Image (cartoon, helix red, strand yellow):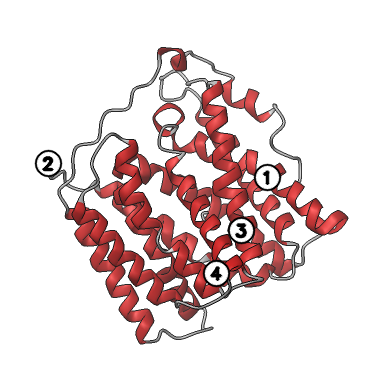
Amino acid sequence: MNAPPDRRGTVAAAAAMSLVGSLTAVSATIADYPVFGGQAVRYAAAALILLAVARLRCGRDGRPVRRAAPRDWALLAALAATGLVAFNVCIVAATRDTSPATIGTVIATVPVVLAVVGPLLDGRRPAPVVVAAACAVAAGAGLASGFGGGGARGLLLSLGALGGEVCFSLLAVPLLPRLGALRVSAYSAALAAPMLLAAGLVTDGTGVLRAPTAAEFAGLAYLSVVVTTIAFLLWYGALGRLGADRAGLFAGVIPVSAVVTTVALGVGRPGAADLAGAALVAAGVVIGLRARTEPRPEPVVPPEAAVPEAAAVPAVAGAGPVPAAADGAA
């Protein structure tokens, strides 16, 4: 069947990946801040914001709040460990053995993986046109980021980052019907913060955290509020509306957005490869969204998940995953 693309989902996916793409330029402001400590601060701050919003919205729409089941917590922990923590660890380690362009090119294949694996997890056949469109998006993203070069270890770590990026979306798919984009974003960020802090203690010891400069504070605030809080909500909302295969096409927007951001900040100019890459990404997204696909099955929510629990969000917030003070997708 040829289901028309969801307009809200399309706008949300494009906006989310555009915001994530701005991370490249903004991250320069925290280049001297401990990497994993900065990421822990970023996710902890985002979690606090998201949990506060979730608490304010708790039960306001008249529907019971669904309690997260043990299986949900296992998926959330896996999502945080792979899509947020392992992704960042692989990115940081890969930069020591290969160029950022190589890392970007490998991660640019995310649309292809999601176009194939996403429908299979839904019990559908991948749409050939969507897969072909995803390949065009990946090629365009690779052009925009530059193909680079590097050693085998750097390539393997880049593939690890790719796996983390894929898990960030696919592990969220079964959670979204049960918990919604807001709580999936909040809980995954809350779980990731202490994991990243632990990684920072291993690599940086007691220097994992320090008082940021004014520029670093502004950069961390932007990453926490815009690249994490807002972009996560937009992405997970789009994922529930479009499905992983179609939403994944917008991952190709990230390097294009990075180029636009550097131009807007006056720190770079687009070259022929950047423009050609952007054109390929745009063409791939349009073709993929218009492709004929099998209808997605309606999500099945187990009865035990619908237990009214007015204090569900505050209880989780007090369970301990969010440190009082503590970089994607990701």
Rendered view: 8 above or below 295: below
Q: Which mark is residue 90?
A: 3
In front of the other: 232 or 153? 153
- Between the residue at mark 3 and the residue at mark 4, the CA separation in whole angstroms equals 16 Å
Which residue carries the number 2 mark?
A: 1
Which residue carries the number 4 mark?
A: 24
- Which residue lies at the image location 52% right of the left edge and 20% below the top edge? 67
The amino acid at mark 1 is Ala
- Which residue lies at the image location 51% right of the left edge and 74% below the top edge? 101
Rendered view: 51 above or below 158: above
Of all residues, the one furthest to the front in this rendering is: 152
Closer to the chain start, of discs 4 and 1, is 4
Closer to the chain start, of discs 3 and 1, is 3
The amino acid at mark 2 is Met
Place of residue 143 in the rendered image (x, y in percent of width and height, measured from the top left): 38, 76
Q: Relative to residue 143, is residue 135 drawn left or right? A: left
Closer to the chain start, of discs 2 and 1, is 2
Quadrant of the rendered structure where residue 204 is?
bottom right
Can residue 198 be spotted in the picture?
Answer: yes
Tell me if label 3 and label 1 are in contact, CB under 8 Å.
Answer: no
Q: Within 10 Å of the Cα at label 1, are there few (<14), some (14-19), or many (20+) other Cα atoms? A: many
